[in-house]
Every structure is written in structure tokens, then in C-alpha cells.
Image: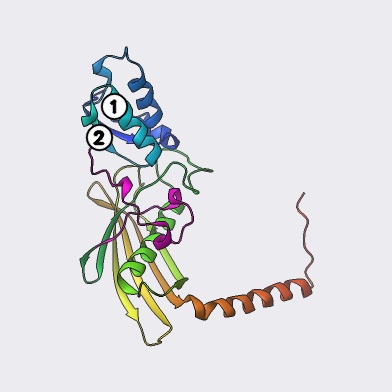
């Protein structure tokens, strides 16, 4: 195997990490911790793939410095540029899947996919070498929220996002390598003061090709205006369920 440059991935992508040209965080750690390991076993450069948590990255950097090879890691690795929990509407940092969006044009924005091994979607079901489709859908949801929060709505107001439609096309397998998201805002309907209707297209790019295309239509509503309505509808759903003639089936 040519160890001159390896793609570093999290342990949950172990099938991909076992391929020539890739390595998992645990495997790299074992090599770096073994002071008797020859230099021929060490890569001269690491390319950041997916699944590498901040804690793993810091640990591996420290091990590399102790071995006298800090050049394994570049200082500009994008894993430290999360879009932010509040912007993506996530409670835990490990569940944030995109970097902060940058504006390319009036209606075009770019960000990176950043998967933590301990992400909520990753912790239960990972098969084969590829990234799950549901994870890409969640990343696209976070992407449109991040773009809307940063570039479209006022930062002083809190908004609630309601999905109207999602259309996904999986064109190729997506693998745990560097991945860019390009989000284009197609239309913003601002005819009502309390809400915006927005249409977006999100493309996932890997190695020069689009692997997934997701179109999302959604509504950004002032949170103060939807809370009471949502509660009323929840009560109606609960009351309808209690009075329904259909009997509940017990799960055993």
C-alpha cells in the first residue's frame, strides 16, 4: 500500500478505512503510539475524510507531535468550522453536519459536509463503504436552515421551519471523503409579513461530480406566531386519537 497520503476516517467507516489509501482513527492511533513502528508505516500526509471527531483529531495531532511529525495535519482542517448548534437547530455539536455557509453569489452558497462518528444518525446503522442517504437528507435540512438564518432572516428574530416538500435523487454512492454542498435559493415568497416561502436546490459534490441532489421547499415562520397554533393542533390530534373508534394494538 502507498502510505504517502491516506484519507483519515472515523471508526464507523471501518470498511472504507480498510481500503488501500484510507485509514481509521484507531488504526492511526495504534501506529503513532507504537514507538517501535518504522517510519515506512506512517503516511507522509493525511487527507481528512468523514467521521473524525474533534477529540480524535486533537488526540492524533498530539500523538503526531510527540513522534516529531506534526506536518501530518494541516492547521486549516474544516472540522473546526461547524455552522453552530443554534444555526442548525441542533442541541449537540456532534450532530451538526455542515460548516458555516459562505456566499458565492446572490442566491448561491457553499459549505462542507462534516460527519462526527458519534452523530445521532451514525450511532445505529452504518453498512458498507458509503454514507447513508438519510444522513445526506439531514445535512441538506441543516444547510437550508443555516443559510436562511445567516443570510435571509433577521438575526434578532426566532424562526420556526416547516417543510413543505423534499425531493431527493441519489445519483452515485456517497463515500466518506471531502464533500461540498452547493445550495441555491430558487425563490423567496415574502408576500406575508410573518413568513417566508423558500425553494432551494442542494447538490452534494465529491471528487468533481454530483453524487446527490436534494430539492427542498419550506416555510420560515416567526416562532411567536406558530407556537399557539401548533399547540392547538397537537391538542386536536390528541383528542381525536382518544375518541377514535380504532383500538390501539399493544406491542409485545
Neighbour class for label 1 at 10 Å: few (<14), some, many (≥20)? Answer: some
Q: Which residue is mark 1?
A: 64
- Quarter of the figure with residue 88: bottom left
28 in relation to 203, above or below: above
Q: Which residue is mark 2?
A: 73
Residue 152 placed where, x, y %?
Answer: 32, 73
114 in relation to 164, above or below: above
Segment tinted magenta in the rendering: 73-102
User: Residue at (31%, 51%) from the top-left corner?
Assistant: 81
Membership of 96 in magenta stretch? yes
Q: Are marks 2 and 1 in contact (CB under 8 Å)?
A: yes
Measure the alpha-carbon separation of dots 2 and 1.
Answer: 8 Å
Pointer 2 or 1: first along the chain: 1
Residue 71 placed where, x, y %?
Answer: 21, 31
User: Residue at (27%, 27%) from the top-left corner?
Assistant: 65
Question: What SS does tag 2 mark?
Answer: loop
Whether residue 9 is visible:
no
User: Residue at (50%, 48%) from the top-left corner?
Assistant: 120
Residue 50 placed where, x, y %?
Answer: 36, 42
Amino acid at each position: 500500500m502507498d502510505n504517502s497520503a491516506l484519507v483519515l476516517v472515523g471508526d464507523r467507516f471501518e470498511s472504507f478505512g480498510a481500503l488501500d489509501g484510507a485509514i481509521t482513527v484507531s488504526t492511526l492511533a495504534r501506529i503513532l503510539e507504537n514507538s517501535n513502528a518504522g517510519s515506512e508505516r506512517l503516511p507522509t500526509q493525511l487527507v481528512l475524510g468523514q467521521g473524525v471527531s474533534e477529540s480524535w483529531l486533537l488526540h492524533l495531532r498530539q500523538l503526531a507531535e510527540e513522534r516529531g511529525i506534526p506536518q501530518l495535519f494541516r492547521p486549516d482542517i474544516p472540522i473546526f468550522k461547524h455552522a453552530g448548534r443554534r444555526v442548525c437547530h441542533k442541541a449537540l455539536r456532534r450532530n451538526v453536519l455542515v460548516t458555516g455557509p459562505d456566499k458565492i453569489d446572490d442566491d448561491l452558497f457553499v459549505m462542507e459536509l462534516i460527519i462526527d462518528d458519534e452523530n445521532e444518525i451514525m450511532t445505529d446503522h452504518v453498512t458498507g463503504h458509503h454514507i447513508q442517504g438519510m444522513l445526506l437528507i439531514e445535512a441538506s435540512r441543516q444547510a437550508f436552515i443555516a443559510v436562511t438564518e445567516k443570510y435571509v432572516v433577521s438575526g434578532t428574530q426566532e424562526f420556526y421551519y416547516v417543510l413543505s416538500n423534499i425531493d431527493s435523487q441519489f445519483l452515485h454512492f456517497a463515500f466518506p471523503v471531502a464533500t461540498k454542498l452547493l445550495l441555491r435559493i430558487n425563490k423567496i415568497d415574502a408576500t406575508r409579513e410573518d413568513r417566508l416561502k423558500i425553494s432551494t436546490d442542494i447538490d452534494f459534490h465529491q471528487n468533481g461530480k454530483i453524487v446527490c441532489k436534494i430539492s427542498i421547499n419550506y416555510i420560515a415562520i416567526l416562532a411567536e406566531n406558530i407556537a399557539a397554533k401548533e399547540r392547538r393542533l397537537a391538542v386536536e390530534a390528541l383528542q381525536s386519537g382518544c375518541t377514535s373508534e380504532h383500538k390501539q394494538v399493544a406491542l409485545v
